[in-house]
Amino acid sequence: MGRGLLVLALLHTPLVLAQALGSSDSMVMDPQALSRAEVVGLYFTPPSDIASAVVQVIASAKREVLVQAYGFTHIGIAQALVGAHQRGVEVKVLLDQKSESTNRLVVELFQSNHISLRFDGSHAIAHNKVMVIDGQVVITGSFNFTQSAQSRNAENLLVLRSEELANNYKQNWLTHWAHSR
Ligand SMILES: [Zn+2]
């Protein structure tokens, strides 16, 4: 059987697929909870304007935005976070340690607007690109919050709605926040 056929066969047999994926303790949450997550948006750039989609999601935040990013140079996304902070949303930004020197413009914008900001130096690269909004919505994908990700790269972004999923991402975010400075 060719590799493609094998994959198809696995996909048509949920039990076999679950076995192929490994035991449940290799996953952070139960697959049934994952299956209840609602896909709110799926974007590919090009052609989509992922940055605008991210700005829209931030604009919808009412209570809290937790950010994890590797590169962050996109001034429009940064300004959307500042706007959220200014209207009373709790915004916390966690960046890879190298961002402190390489993403100065955005870092200074956050600092001058008193947004909580930490740098994670515990990994070769802190490569997550995640936002958790109001404990309900998660955005994640390959998309770094950078100008070049929008204008020059091939990227994807998923917007998911699920309290359980958001809580899992938040717990992971908190783990990194705790060992960052
Ligand atoms: Zn970390």
Image (tube, rainbow, N blue to C red):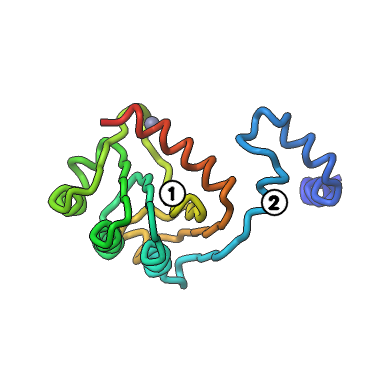
Q: Is residue 24 left or right of residue 90?
A: right
Q: Judge by depth and name the residue closer to the eye, 54 or 88.
A: 88
Instruction: Locate the C terminus by quadrant.
Output: top left
Residue pictured at 49% horizontal, 59% vertical: 157
Residue pictured at 31% horizontal, 45% vertical: 93
Disc assigned to residue 35:
2
Residue pictured at 86% horizontal, 45% vertical: 1
- Comparing marks 1 and 2, which lies closer to the viewer? 2
Labels 1 and 2: the sequence-earlier one: 2
Image quarter for ligand 1 equals top left
Residue 19 lies in quadrant: top right
Residue 153 lies in quadrant: bottom left
Identified by mark 1, the residue type is Val
Secondary structure at numbered mark 1 = strand
Q: Judge by depth and name the residue closer to the eye, 109 or 3.
A: 109
Residue pictured at 16% horizontal, 53% vertical: 113
Residue 129 place in picture, x, y as percent: 42, 48
Q: Is residue 102 left or right of residue 138?
A: left
Disc assigned to residue 130:
1
Secondary structure at numbered mark 2 = helix
Residue 76's place in the image compared with 93, above or below, is below
Residue 163's place in the image compared with 175, above or below, is below
Identified by mark 2, the residue type is Ser
